Amino acid sequence: MIATTPERRAELVERLVCWKDGGVMVRDDRLLGPREEADRASLRFLERAFRVPEVGSVAVDRDQAAAWIRPARVPGNPAGFLGKLAAALRADDERGLGSATTLPRAVRLRSFTVYRHGQMLSTCEVLADRPGWLRLRHPTLRSDPLLAQRFERMMAAVPGVTRSALSARGSVLGLRYDRGVIAPPRLLRMAEEVLDAPAWWDRAVPPPERTSFALPNANLAIGAAADLALPALAPLSAALLIYSNLKTFRLAWHQGRRRQVGLPVLYSCIVVGTLASGQFLASALMSWSLKFWHDRLRRDLSAERRRLLAECLPLPELARVANQGDVDVLVPVDRLRPGDRVAVAAGEVVPADGKVVGGGGIVDEGAVRGRPGASRVAEGDLLLAGSTVRAGSLLMEVGRPVAAARVSAISRAILSATTLPGGVTAPTLKAERSAERAVVPTITMAGVGLLTGDLATAAAILRPDYATGPAIAVPLETVKDAADCARKGMVVRSPEAFERLARVDTILLDDNRFLRDRGLEVFEVRTRLPEDLLLRLAASAYRHLADDRAEALSNACRRRRIHLLDLPPREFDPGVAVEYGGRLVRVRDLDDGPLPKRSGPLAVEVDGTVVGVVEFEPGPRPRASEAVSRLRERPGTAVLLLSGRPEPEAAALAAALGIPAWRGGMSAGDKEAFLRACRALGRRTAFVGDGREAPGAASEADVAISTGGDPDCPDDPSAVVLLHPDLDRVPDLLEIARAHSTRIRGAQTFVVLPNVLCVAGAFFLGVSALAVVVVSNLSTFGLYRRTASALRSPRKGIAALPAPVLAPVSSPIASAGGTS
C-alpha cells in the first residue's frame, strides 16, 4: 500500500504537478525519500504508476523525494491521462508488476529510472528495436567506464549476440543478434542480470564518493572577480580564504609549538602573503587545483586497482550452477555456497575454491598458485578460484565461497600494498614528507625575495607545489609494480616494500628443501632438424604447461641464447600443440599414458609426424643456483646462506648453490640475532625464507620475502610472499623495485625543475604568483599524463624474434632410436 487511508491517497494525488520537466511530478518524503523504510512504498508506487498503459517511464530521485512520471508520447487528452494516473494511485489491490523483476533492486538506489518496453519494465532505455538490432542506454555506463566495458564484454558472450559495440561516450550499447536464437525481451533480461551482478572487484574496491567542489568553486569565482573586475569582493574572498584554511592554521600552530616547520607552516605563510598582497585569484586557483588533484588521485587509484585486479586475478561475474533439472542457472559468484555444483567450460574462470566432481581438463592456476603454465585435473582434484580452464569441461563442488578463497586473500594483500597512508596536508604521507624538505629553503628564499624585491616576489616564491606531483605518481606507480609482481606470482603486502627492496645490499637465504631441489635438465636431443630449432619449438610450445620439463627446455634455450616464440596454444590433448609456419607442432610424452611422466622423454611432432625426441635427467646442481648467480651479479650485493643443519651440510649446499658465505647450526633465535647484528652494522638486509617458521628473523630484516605461499597468514610478517617457492622470482622482484625507485626519483625531478625555474623567474624576471601556480599545475599534469600512460600501456609478452621457416619433413621418424 502506498497510503494507509483514502485521505492519505487523496492527499498524494493532490501533489501531482502537470507537465513538470515533460511529465507529471510527485513529491512525498515518506513515499519517495531516502529512508530505508520507504523502499517498499516506492515499489508499490511504481507498481500502480505502470498500470496506466500510457506511462512510458518513471524517474525517481530519492534525495529530492520526487518522481517524474512521463508518458510514452504526448497524450491528446492530458486530463484523461491524469485521471487514469490518479485512479491507479488510489487503487487498493495488491497486484504485482509481473515481469518487472529488477525493480526491488532499483528502488534501493538513490536515483533511478524505469522504462516500459512492450510488456517489459527495465532500468535500460531502449533507443532502437529493429529486427536483429537493439540499442540500450543506461546512465551508469557513462559514469563508470569499467562497468561499461564489462557490460559490453558480457553481452557479447550471450548466445545469439553476433556483435556488441559501445558508443563513443560509453552510455549506449548496440547489439546485433540472431532472431532465431534470442528475442529482445530475453536480451533485455540478460542486460538487467549483468547490471545487477557487478564484478567482484567492483564490490571489493568500490569507487570513492564524490568530492564536493562547492567551496573551491565559489572561492575561485569570487577571487577571479575580486582580482579582475570587482575589487569590492576582496574582503569576501579574504574571508573565504581564511575559512577554508582554518585547519591549516591549527596544524601550523601545533607544529610551531613543537618547533617544527612543515607544509602547514608553508601554507599558512602563503595565506598571509595572499592577504597582504591581495592576489586572491592565485590563491584560489592553487586551492582549487589541490582539491582537483586529490580527487583525481582517489578516482584514478580506485579505477586502476579494480582494472589491474581484474586483469591479474580474473573472476567471473556469474557462475553456472547446475540444479536438479539439469538446467544451468546463472548466479552471482558471491552468492555461491559450499555444496553448490558449478559447471565450468573451456575458456571460463573457476568462480570458487572446490574440487572436481565430474569431467576433466587442463587448468591454468598460475594466477593463484604462482607457477606459470597449465596442469591436467580430473575427478577429486582441487580447484582454486581465479584459475582458467584451457581445455575440457568440469563440474566442481564449491568448498568455500569466493570471499574466503585464496584469490581474495591475494587481492587483500595487493590492496594493502597499494593503499598508501594519507598525509595531513597532502594526498599521501610519503609525498608530504618529501615536500617538507623544501619548506625551509622556500621560506628562506621568500624572505630574501621580500628584502631584495617586494611582497609580490615573495608570494610568487612561496607558490610552487612540490607535493602534489609525487603524491599522484607514487601511488599509481605502486599499483603498476604490485600488479607486475602479482603476474609473476609475487604478492606484495606492504606499500614500502619496493623502496626497501631497492636499498638492499645483503640477501640472506634461509635453508629449506626448495634450495636443495635439483630439478631437471635436457640430457639428450635426437632430431633430424637443426637442434636449436627443435629446442626452440619444444620450449615455445611446452612452456604453456606447469611441468618441470618446460623449465628445463627454457633453461636449455637460455643457455644457448635461443629466443622463445610467442605461440599461443591450439590444443592441449595430448601434450600441447601450437601453430608455426602454417604447421601444427605438438610436444607430448613419448610414451602415451593417462598421466604425464613429469620426467620422461618428450616427442616433438610436426603435422602428426615425430621429428625429434628430448630426454631429461636430474640436474647436477640445485635449480636455485642460477637465481643465486643472478643475485650475485648485482653490484654491491652480498648473498649468504643461513642453515639449521650442521656446518658440513651447510657448506656443501652453499658450494652447490655458488654462495661464498654461510652459517650452519643456527636456531631460529640465532638467525634473528644475526639479522639484528647486520642491521646494527648498517647493512640493508633481505631475508628469504618461510616467514611462518622464522617470524623473528623476518621481522628483524629490512624486508622479508616469504616462501610460505600464504599471502593472508597473520603469523607471517613478510612484506612479500612468493606463491610458488621459486628463487628465480627474487632477482625479478629486485629489478622491479630498482626500476620503481628510479621512476619515483624521476617523478620528483620532473616536478622540482619547473618549480625551481619559477623561483628563479620570480627573482630575476618578475614572474607573478598566478603564473607560478599555472606552471606548477602544468608540470603536475605532465607527470600525471606520463604516469597514467605508462600504467595503461599494454604489457610486453615473450619476444617473437625472427626464426627460420620450418623445413619440410620428407620421411617420418619411426622411433627414438632411429633419430640422428
Image: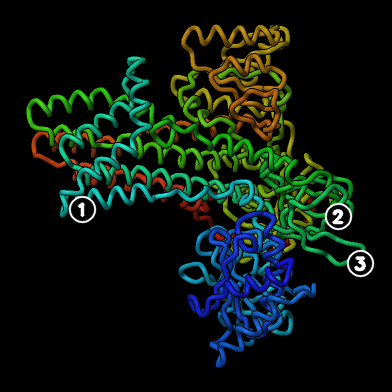
Query: Cα distance, mark 3 to mark 1?
Result: 72 Å
Total marks in image: 3
Distance from the alpha carbon under mark 2 to that under mark 1: 67 Å
Q: Inspect the image, locate mark 3, and give the three-letter code of the amino acid beneath it.
A: Gly
Closer to the camera, 367 or 233?
Answer: 233
Q: Residue at x 47, y 45 (%)?
A: 298
Q: Nearer the viewer, mark 3 or mark 1?
A: 1
Q: Colour mode?
A: rainbow
The picture quadrant where one finds residue 439 is top left
Residue at horizontal 69%, vertical 42%?
408
Residue 76 position within the rendered picture, expressed as x and y whole percent measured from the top left:
55, 93
Q: Which residue is mark 3?
A: 325
Q: Quadrant of residue 179?
A: bottom right
- Viewed as shown, does residue 260 lie left or right of 164? left
Q: Position of residue 742 (x, y in %)?
A: 39, 33
In depth, the one of 430 and 105 nearer the eye is: 105
Q: Is residue 734 visible?
A: yes
For the residues labelled 2 and 1, say whether their Cβ atoms are less than 8 Å apart.
no
Q: Is residue 148 visible?
A: no
Q: Amino acid at mark 1?
A: Ala
